[in-house]
Image: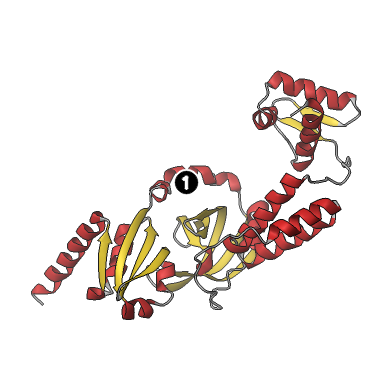
Amino acid sequence: MNRIDRLSAILIQLQGKKIVKAAEIAERFQISLRTVYRDVRALQEAGVPVGAEAGTGYYLVEGYHLPPVMFNREEAAALLTGEKMMAQLSDHSNRKQFGNAMQKIRAVLRSSEKDFLESLEENIAVISRRPPEDSEFPNRFLSDIQYALGKHLMLKLDYFALHSETLTHREIEPIGIIYMMGYWYLIAWCRLRHAYRNFRMDRIRNLGVTAISYERERHISLKEYMEKYAEPAAYPHVVKLRFSAIMAKKLGNQRFYYGLMEEQAAGDCVEMTFLTSHLDWFGRWVLTIGKEVEIIGPEELKEHMRKLATEIYEQYLLT
């Protein structure tokens, strides 16, 4: 990237945040801090009102605006790919908002870029094995959750826990959101449990943003939460099961809730591949299916099932 293009990109970066650290600019463009200082000084000498706070970073003086940003062909293609991914990997609220944003982006593209996107659009597909839409859990709260995160506002929600199959009312202080293993999770301090909890967003029945603010500094960061609590999820288990065709049909939507990745016919049976972070939780579900399921792997799950079966046998042996 030549210096003129880099100066333009730095100016756009400054407009995108309230404060931008010199280290952020250096990392983005793979340049030294000394080069960052020279580039910022060049912008100031060109009449751009770039302010600086010692030890904090750079900012654009309030009231200064750049002319509308134009996208090149590669950037427009990347945004189109993002739109395809959002359609499959987000919820109702964010899909609608991203669609509105893409309409505005298309409106400012040059004719050649618009033609390019139209020809490219039908040649990009994102496939997600998400369960069918469930009207009981509308899955449209991501935008509200993002608003509460940005404003540090408490949320009230009705949440259905899969492991206990119970619906509870919660008041929570959100600290972040994570997309993991095909689902969005809301990470928050739960006032009911007095502990940090993660809530799968497609299990939220109702949600409301309150006017009650909380002190964000009292909580750990999302990064700290992931390092402390979510480490096991970084190493999920791939589980392969074989069901009779009749049982596979009886499972219905259950298979999606337990992390279904793939299923295929195998003679008179159906083989399914799941991704799970908790073999104990997954094994207890398999136990409810009885003899109608065969574990293909991993061996660790087979051993765990032997342990669960033994515990049940011993519990009822003398009763």
Residue 282 x %, y %: 33, 63
Q: Residue 40 sits in which quadrant?
A: top right
Q: Residues within 10 Å of mark 1 (few under 14, many from 20)?
A: some
The residue that label 1 is drawn on is 226
Is residue 36 shown above or below 68?
A: above
Q: Residue furthest right?
A: 47
Residue 285 x %, y %: 31, 69
Would residue 236 be found to the left or right of residue 197 on screen?
left
Residue in the picture at 88% in, 40% down:
64
Residue 212 visible, this orientation: no
Q: Quadrant of the C terminus?
A: bottom left
Residue in the picture at 72% in, 34% down:
20
| Residue type, label 1 | Met
Would residue 167 be found to the left or right of residue 248 on screen?
right
Q: Quadrant of the N terminus?
A: top right
**Total marks drawn?**
1
Residue in the picture at 12% in, 68% down:
314
Residue 100 visible, this orientation: yes
Residue in the picture at 20% in, 64% down:
308
Residue 165 x %, y %: 40, 73
Would residue 200 be found to the left or right of residue 271 on screen?
right
Q: Secondary structure at mark 1?
A: helix
Residue 68 x %, y %: 86, 46
Q: Residue furthest top?
A: 34
